[in-house]
C-alpha cells in the first residue's frame, strides 16, 4: 500500500501517468482500506483491477465449485491493478473496471500470457460510500437493507470478548486444576522459572510475571475471581478472571455479564457465509465465533446494564418508542432481544444479505405487524433456551453413547451411513444425522470442535450427557430456523424505518 501511495504521489506531481502493480488483493474490499480506495478514485480517471484470487486464507473456491489456486506460492490472493491519470485533480470522474480469473495456477498463467487490457472482459463498477469496494457487490437489496436497524443502534453498549493472552494458564475444563494452579502461582517460594517453563508464561510489554504473582499473592479473597466463561458455542471453561493475568479483561462490558444477564454475540466482519450469532449469560472470549483474527470475532451486545444495584435496559429508547407506537402495545427489552435473535437465525435473511453481512454488523428489519413480531419473538425465545441448554426438549436425547472402553477421545470420525461419531476405534455416539454433524455456528463445526478440544482426554458421564444435549439443541435449532424462514418474507412487506431513516425524514418527534 505504501508503494501505491508513493507512485500516486509521483504521478500527482507530474499531473499525468500510469501505474501498474501486482499486489495482494486485500485492499480491494478490506474495510481498513476504504479511505484509500476513495482517495484513489479522487486521484485517477480510470482504475482497472484484475483479481486473480487464490486466497487460501479465505478458502476461496471457483464459482463453479472447482479448486482455485494462487499464481504464486503464497496464501494471500493476488491482483493486478492499472491506475490511469489523464487530467488534473478535480477535473474528472473516476471509472472503475473489474475482472476476475479463477481456477488452477496453470490456467491463470496461460491466460495472462496470451491476454492484455484490450482483450480482457471488464465490468464497470460503481463504488460508493461508505466502503467504495473495488469488487462487485450485490447491490439490488442494498436500499432495503440500509433501512434496517444496525445492531449498534439497537444495543448502544457493546464490545468484543476478553483476550487473556494466557488461555492455557488462566482457563481449564477442570475447576480443581485451575484452583491448584493459581494457588501455586500465589506461592512465593516457587520460582518464576517454573511458570515460564511449565505454562509458557513470559514477560511482555504489558505483562510482568513477578509483579502479577506479587499482586495475586496479596489478594486475601483471591477465590472470588473464579468464574465461568463461554469460549465456543455450547463450550464453557473455568477461568481466573483477575486483571493481573488477563490481557484485556474489558470490564466496561463484562462487568454487566457477571450479574444476571443475557447477550447476543455476533460479528462485524466475516470471511465467508454469515453464521455468526450466538447467545450467552456469561462472560465470553474474543474468539467465541471464529478463530480468523478480527474476522468473525465475537462482539457482545448485552440486554441489561448495571450501575450499582440498578438494572437498566441496553436497548435504544427510540426503537422501543417506535415499536410501541406501531404496535399499540407494550414492548420490553427482552422481547426485542428474542426477536433480533430469531432474525439472525433466518437462513432467508442470511442468504439474501450475505454480501452486506460480510462487511459490517448485521442490520435488523423490524416488522410493523405486532402479530408477526410476537411470532418471531417466540421463536427467538425458543432458540435462546436451546442455546443456553435450558430447554425442556433437551431432556429427551436423540443420540446415545455406545461401546466399552475408557472414553478417551482419540481419532474423531463420522460414519455417514450409520450416523455415528467415533471418538476412538471402539466408542461412538449414534443417532446423529449428517445435517446435525455438519452444522456450523460462526466458523466452527460445532460437534467436531467440541470433541477436538477434548482430544486425549477422557469423557466423564456429565461430558457425554452434555454432548447429547448439544445434539438435540442443534436438531431443534434447524427445525426452528425452518419455522422462522416460513415467516421471514412477511417481515419485509412493511418495516419500521431505522433510526437514521427516521432522523433524515424529520420524524424525530414521532420517535420521541
Image: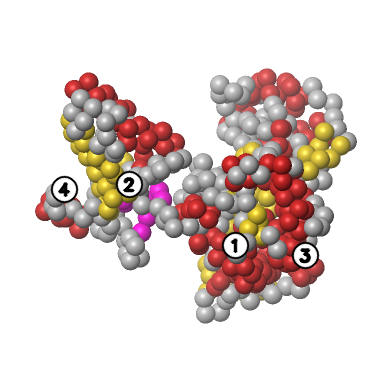
User: In 3D space, how far apart are the residues under numbered discs 1 and 3 (Cα atoms)?
Assistant: 30 Å
- In the rendered image, is residue 481 in sight? no
Image height of 377 relative to 321, above or below: below
- Whichever of labels 1 and 4 marks the residue nearer the N terminus, that label is 4
417 horizontally vs 311: left or right: left
Of the residues tagged 1 and 3, which is closer to the observer?
1
- Whichever of labels 2 and 1 marks the residue nearer the N terminus, that label is 2
The residue furthest left is: 114
Which quadrant holds the N terminus? top left
Given residues 118 and 256, the one toward you in this image is 118
Q: Are marks 3 and 4 in contact (CB under 8 Å)?
A: no
Q: Residue at x 68, y 33 (%)?
A: 249
Neighbor class of circle 4 (other Cα within 10 Å; few <14, some 14-19, many 20+) is: few
- Whichever of labels 2 and 3 marks the residue nearer the N terminus, that label is 2
Q: Give residue 393's position: percent from left, percent from top.
A: 76, 70
**Mark 2 highlights which residue?**
77
Given residues 436 and 321, the one toward you in this image is 321
User: In 3D space, how far apart are the residues under numbered discs 2 and 1 (Cα atoms)?
Assistant: 37 Å
**Mark 3 highlights which residue?**
391
Q: Residue at x 36, y 39 (%)?
A: 27
Mark 4 secondary-structure assignment: loop
Whether the magenta-drawn stretch holds residue 356 is answered as: no
Residue numbers of the magenta segment: 52-61
Amino acid at each position: 500500500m505504501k508503494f501505491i501511495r508513493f507512485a500516486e504521489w509521483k504521478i500527482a506531481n507530474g499531473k499525468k501517468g500510469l501505474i501498474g502493480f501486482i499486489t495482494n488483493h486485500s485492499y480491494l474490499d478490506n474495510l481498513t482500506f476504504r479511505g484509500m480506495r476513495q482517495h484513489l478514485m479522487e486521484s485517477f480517471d480510470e482504475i482497472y483491477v484484475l483479481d486473480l484470487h487464490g486466497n487460501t486464507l479465505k478458502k476461496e473456491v471457483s464459482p463453479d465449485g472447482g479448486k482455485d489456486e494462487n499464481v504464486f506460492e503464497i496464501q494471500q490472493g493476488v491482483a493486478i491493478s492499472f491506475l490511469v491519470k489523464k487530467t488534473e485533480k478535480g477535473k474528472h470522474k473516476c471509472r472503475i473496471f473489474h475482472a476476475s480469473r479463477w481456477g488452477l495456477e496453470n490456467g491463470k498463467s496461460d491466460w495472462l500470457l496470451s491476454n492484455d487490457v484490450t482483450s480482457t472482459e471488464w465490468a464497470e463498477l460503481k463504488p460508493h460510500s461508505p466502503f467504495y469496494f473495488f469488487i462487485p457487490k450485490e447491490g439490488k437489496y442494498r436500499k432495503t437493507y440500509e433501512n434496517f436497524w444496525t445492531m449498534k443502534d439497537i444495543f448502544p453498549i457493546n464490545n468484543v470478548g476478553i483476550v487473556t493472552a494466557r488461555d492455557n494458564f488462566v482457563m481449564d475444563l477442570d475447576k480443581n486444576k485451575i484452583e491448584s494452579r493459581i494457588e501455586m502461582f500465589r506461592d512465593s517460594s516457587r520460582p518464576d522459572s517454573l511458570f515460564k517453563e511449565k505454562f509458557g508464561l513470559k514477560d511482555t510489554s504489558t505483562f510482568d510475571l513477578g509483579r502479577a504473582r506479587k499482586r495475586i499473592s496479596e489478594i486475601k479473597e483471591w477465590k472470588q475471581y473464579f468464574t465461568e466463561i463461554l469460549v465456543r458455542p455450547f463450550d464453557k471453561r473455568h477461568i481466573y478472571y483477575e486483571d493481573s493475568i488477563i490481557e484485556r479483561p474489558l470490564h466496561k462490558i463484562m462487568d454487566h455479564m457477571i450479574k444476571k444477564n443475557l447477550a447476543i454475540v455476533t460479528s462485524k466482519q466475516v470471511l465467508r457465509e454469515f453464521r455468526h450469532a450466538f447467545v450467552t449469560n456469561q462472560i465470553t472470549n474474543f474468539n467465541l465465533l471464529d478463530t480468523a483474527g478480527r474476522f468473525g470475532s465475537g462482539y457482545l451486545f448485552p440486554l441489561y446494564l448495571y450501575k450499582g444495584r440498578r438494572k437498566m435496559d441496553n436497548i435504544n429508547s427510540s426503537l422501543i418508542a417506535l415499536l410501541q407506537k406501531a404496535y399499540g402495545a407494550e414492548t420490553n427489552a427482552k422481547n426485542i432481544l428474542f426477536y433480533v435473535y430469531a432474525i439472525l437465525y433466518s437462513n432467508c435473511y442470511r442468504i439474501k444479505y450475505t454480501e452486506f453481512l460480510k462487511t459490517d454488523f448485521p442490520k435488523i428489519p423490524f416488522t410493523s405487524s405486532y402479530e408477526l413480531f410476537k411470532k418471531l419473538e417466540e421463536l427467538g425465545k425458543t432458540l435462546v433456551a436451546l442455546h443456553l441448554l435450558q430447554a425442556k426438549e433437551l431432556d429427551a436425547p436423540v443420540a446415545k453413547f455406545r461401546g466399552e472402553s475408557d472414553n478417551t477421545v482419540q481419532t474423531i470420525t463420522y460414519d455417514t451411513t450409520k450416523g455415528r461419531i467415533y471418538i476412538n476405534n471402539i466408542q461412538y455416539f449414534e443417532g446423529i444425522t449428517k445435517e446435525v454433524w455438519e452444522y456450523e455456528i460462526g466458523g466452527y463445526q460445532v460437534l467436531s470442535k467440541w470433541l477436538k478440544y477434548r482430544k486425549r482426554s477422557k469423557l466423564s458421564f456429565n461430558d457425554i450427557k452434555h454432548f447429547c444435549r448439544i445434539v438435540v439443541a442443534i436438531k431443534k435449532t434447524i427445525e426452528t430456523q425452518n419455522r422462522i424462514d416460513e415467516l421471514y418474507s412477511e417481515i419485509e412487506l412493511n418495516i419500521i424505518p431505522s433510526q437514521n431513516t427516521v432522523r433524515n425524514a424529520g420524524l424525530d418527534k414521532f420517535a420521541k
